[in-house]
Image: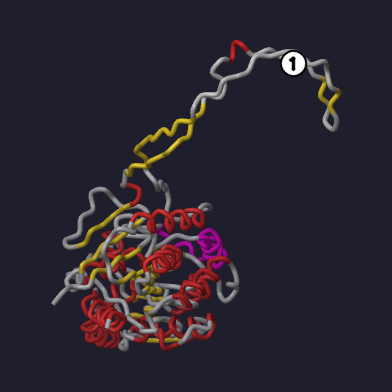
């Protein structure tokens, strides 16, 4: 049977990542490549990255030939024979001077000169920054031009940064467009989202043939807050890379409660600090660790100091994947108090390490991690109560951890890839 040829448009890809989007693209690409022919276009890729059965094209690595045609005319072949005319020219009127005899100027023929030059069409230092929108527009233009002669069946885009490119390629080729929604502007801006990015998302989802939100939670947001036809939506939950868990001995006796993620309002780090304050009053032999960075980090550190939590709360900043795994190998409880979380891959990673999880009900991962303890993000009293139970009762903590391990059997990228291929088949039938 002929394999479907997929043109995938991504923005992040390891090792050049900012968060979960790149991790998800890697896991999905590996799994999908077993079923389809996959070409992935990225704005920036590591020249050393290679993935079996996936053709990875980083625009920053592409040197292309630009053909220019210049029309050159030597207007004055006999410049030395031209006489000057004295003139008194004002802005709004001209006073004529006596006519001076001149020789006729001979014009040469117009020449068409073709030139070729090598150039790099897409240069980007950072994936996100003040010029992100400009880069998104440039990415759309370069990607669309590049792939016009390619043979593919489906266009598959990841998040708003690639949506303009996807819509442009669909309009030029007529190929079906699939949008993979890892997060929406409505999520990121807590509902204050009627901006340029929101409009791009809305327009692209209206143009798309199929939409793949990473959870039913995110799919409902697309329907309720973007007005998207629910028949287009096919929720595909994220998977998690299988890893061999291990344990690391803590250099201190206290138990660790861990937060991993961007330190932004969407992830609820301020609720984590509030929970820490409540737990430590009853259970002082605990340490709370915030692993990540973001615009709320300074405010969070100041809040921790104000609440006199300095000795029991630690801020690591951004950590590599290896360092995150070391933290999970030491952790006793994982807490995800997200205000609005499309999915929450880090909770699945914690479950792989046998760490019992307390997760927000306002998250996609709560749909698949049935064994986790779930609570509304704003209910800090209940969250603190659950964490205290896990810290004080090892048997209860083990039960929660064991339950989550059963859920992980279905949380694989292979399972996600099969569901996505079914969507492709439906579109191409």
Q: Is residue 312 visible?
A: no
Find out whether residue 313 is within the magenta segment.
Answer: yes
Q: Quadrant of residue 179?
A: bottom left
**Residue under the point 21% across and 62% down:** 54
| 208 versus 121 height, above or below | below
**Residue under the point 47% across and 73% down:** 184
The residue segment tinted magenta is 295-317
| 374 versus 150 height, above or below | below
- Image quarter where the N terminus lies is bottom left
Q: Residue furthest left?
A: 1
Colouring of the image: secondary structure
Q: Nearer the viewer, residue 279 or 31?
A: 31
Residue 196: x percent and y percent?
A: 57, 66
Q: Nearer the viewer, residue 355 or 122?
A: 122
Report helix, strand or loop for mark 1.
loop
Residue 356: x percent and y percent?
A: 31, 80
Q: Quadrant of residue 64?
A: top left
Q: Give the labeled residue for mark 1.
A: 85
Find out whether residue 209 is within the magenta segment.
Answer: no
């Amino acid at each position: 049977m002929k394999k479907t040829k997929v043109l995938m448009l991504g923005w992040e890809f390891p090792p050049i990542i900012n968060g979960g989007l790149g991790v998800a693209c890697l896991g999905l690409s590996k799994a999908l490549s077993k079923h389809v022919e996959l070409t992935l276009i990225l704005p920036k890729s590591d020249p050393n990255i290679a993935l079996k059965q996936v053709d990875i094209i980083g625009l920053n690595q592409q040197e292309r030939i630009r053909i220019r045609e210049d029309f050159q005319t030597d207007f004055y072949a006999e410049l030395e024979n031209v006489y000057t005319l004295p003139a008194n020219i004002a802005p709004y009127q001209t006073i004529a001077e006596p006519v001076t005899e001149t020789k006729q100027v001979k014009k040469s023929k117009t020449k068409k000169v073709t030139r070729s030059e090598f150039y790099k069409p897409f240069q980007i230092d950072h994936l996100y920054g003040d010029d992100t929108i400009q880069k998104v527009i440039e990415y759309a233009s370069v990607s669309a031009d590049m792939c016009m002669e390619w043979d593919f069946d489906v266009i598959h885009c990841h998040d708003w940064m690639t949506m303009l490119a996807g819509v442009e390629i669909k309009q030029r080729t007529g190929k079906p467009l699939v949008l993979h929604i890892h997060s929406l502007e409505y999520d990121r801006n807590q509902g204050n989202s009627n901006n340029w990015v929101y409009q791009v998302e809305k327009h692209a989802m209206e143009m798309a043939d199929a939409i793949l939100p990473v959870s039913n939670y995110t799919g409902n947001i697309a329907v309720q807050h973007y007005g998207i036809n629910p028949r287009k939506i096919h929720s595909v939950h994220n998977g998690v890379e299988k890893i061999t868990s291990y344990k690391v001995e803590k250099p201190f006796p206290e138990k660790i409660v861990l937060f991993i993620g961007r330190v932004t309002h969407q992830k609820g780090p301020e609720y984590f600090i509030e929970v820490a304050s409540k737990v430590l009053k009853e259970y002082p032999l605990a340490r709370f660790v915030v692993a990540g960075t973001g615009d709320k980090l300074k405010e969070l550190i100041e809040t921790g100091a104000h609440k006199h939590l300095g000795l029991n709360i630690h801020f690591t900043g951004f950590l590599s994947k290896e360092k995150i795994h070391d933290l999970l190998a030491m952790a006793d409880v994982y807490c995800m108090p997200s205000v609005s979380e499309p999915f929450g891959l880090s909770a699945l990673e914690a479950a792989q390490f046998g760490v019992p999880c307390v997760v927000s009900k306002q998250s996609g991962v709560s749909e698949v991690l049935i064994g986790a303890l779930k609570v509304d993000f704003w209910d800090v009293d209940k969250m603190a109560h659950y964490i205290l139970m896990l810290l004080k009762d090892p048997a209860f903590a083990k039960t929660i951890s064991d339950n989550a391990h059963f859920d992980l059997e279905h949380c694989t990228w292979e399972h996600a890839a099969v569901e996505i291929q079914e969507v492709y088949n439906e579109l191409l039938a």
